Amino acid sequence: MTQFTKYPKVSILEGTETFLVAQNGAIKQCSIADIAAAAPNSAGVYPDVPLNRITIKRFSAQASGTVVATDNLEMMNRIFSLFFPCLINRNSQIVAYLNGDDTTKTIDGLAATLDDYSMPCMVRIGGYYRKYEYDAVTNTKIEKYSVLPVKGYKYIRRRFFPMYAGEVEEQGGKKILTSNAGKWSTQNLNIQQFHEYAKNMGDNFRAIAIQDFNEYRKMFFMWKRSYNSQAFYGITGFDWNKWNATANTQSGKTSVAQPYINGVTKTIKGMEGQLAEQTFTYKDGSTIKYKPYKFLWAEGFLAGPFWIRCSGALKKNHKWYVAKDINTCASWDATDDNHKFICDACKEEGYIMENFEDTMFPTQVGGSDSKGLFDYYWLNKTDVTSNFIPVVVGGADHGSSVGVSALYSGNVVSHSNPDTGSALASDDPTDTTPDGTVVV
């Protein structure tokens, strides 16, 4: 067999030919009809066929956190090409593209300003299409993704995620939530304050929400082919009771959300990686080891040394609700028109069993560390009438118990501890397609 480029070209196509196609490193055959079947219709809508998507599958009861990716794997690279680190202004417009290999520089090689509050360090994510399916016969969860407008798929609107943990500072007489390097992230604030301080940055800003993080963690699934971030980053738990009583030697503060200053991972080349093992010393002289890491240019975001509070959902009267539109939600009352019911909450702590309805909120309990998601929840067992905010990512005192998502509801809306916090987020105002629009 010779090289493809040395074969003579076909002069006339009759419709009966069989082509050899190189796809994802393997030689496959297809016909003209197969290629035509993947083409869009007159409205520009593509059919839901393997050539137009990447599919991720996971058997719900399997012990491993591994997922299987099938169909057009090249689609994954096309989806990730939509994401990039950048600096945005207070109107949520991009003012500088950061170098994807070295985020201390702009895309043209100049030194990047990473500590200016008016230019948050962000990652743009979104602009793709997704469809969720559940096969009850095989108990398999199926996620389909595409950069193309495929029939039946939902559009995931472009948005900006924080590169660094949120820090509140005062500028122009207003407290604002930032995402900048070189800041100690103090987090002893309640969720309404985080939301208010995010809005003080500009009209398009908000505290990061459940809907945001759900999309982020799906990208982890796609890229790493696993639900268990700890297998990659070696996340370990901190003893928050010790940590809270220990003044950080560099910041001089006790209520810092991580044992390092924001931006410590900017020395890591590429979109992901870890630093060498670090040591944190408690007041009593005991120590703990940890490794700061980043994924998709976001620092310590999948789990680890601090909670990130999400403003997009809440619990009231022992039921979970989520904001219908995280961009316009202005009320924290789950019974108003801004929220929709998701599921009943749980009274106990433990691992979350997987189910076909949802993997973010627990509708079943009784799982274990080998069956169900690598998720963990801890709900208030007695006070079932207060509002609770679910929290995703890891915690300083439960970092070793969670994976790529977790729920923590020990604190009511009006309270926050030093190990909880929030991060800045924004929607891309240049994307005018509503989030969740279904292609028809």
Image (tube, helix red, strand yellow):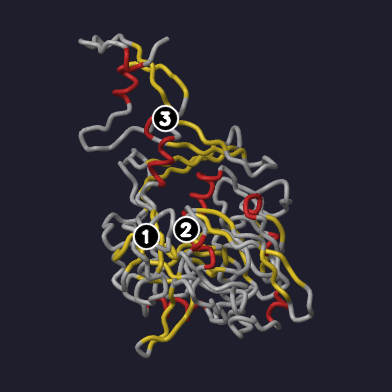
Q: Tell me the quarter of the picture where residue 43 sits.
A: top left
Classify mark 1: helix, strand or loop.
loop
Viewer-nearest of discs 1 and 3: 1
Where residue 296 sits in the image (x, y, percent)? Answer: 48, 55
State the residue at coordinates (35%, 56%): 158
- Residue 119: assigned label: none
- Mark found first going from the N terminus, 1 or 3: 3
Does residue 260 show up?
yes
In the image, residue 149 sits, relative to residue 187, either above or below, namely above
Q: Which residue is mark 1?
A: 98
Contact flag, marks 1 and 3 (Cβ < 8 Å): no
**Can you say which quadrant of the picture contains the C terminus?**
top left
Classify mark 3: helix, strand or loop.
helix
Label 3 Cα neighbours within 10 Å, binned few <14 / some 14-19 / many ≥20: some
**Can you say which quadrant of the picture contains the N terminus?**
top left
State the residue at coordinates (56%, 75%): 387
In the image, residue 258 sits, relative to residue 434, either above or below, namely below
Q: Amino acid at mark 1?
A: Leu
Does residue 196 show up?
no
Which residue is nearer to you in this view: 367 or 228? 228
Where residue 240 sits in the image (x, y, percent)? Answer: 70, 75
Q: Which residue is mark 2?
A: 297
Contact flag, marks 2 and 1 (Cβ < 8 Å): yes
Classify mark 2: helix, strand or loop.
loop
How far separated are the C-alphas under marks 1 and 3?
Answer: 34 Å
Q: Is residue 56 left or right of residue 228?
A: left
Q: Tell me the quarter of the picture where residue 199 sits.
A: bottom left
Label 2 Cα neighbours within 10 Å, binned few <14 / some 14-19 / many ≥20: many
Q: Which residue is mark 3?
A: 50
Where residue 411 sits in the image (x, y, percent)? Answer: 62, 76
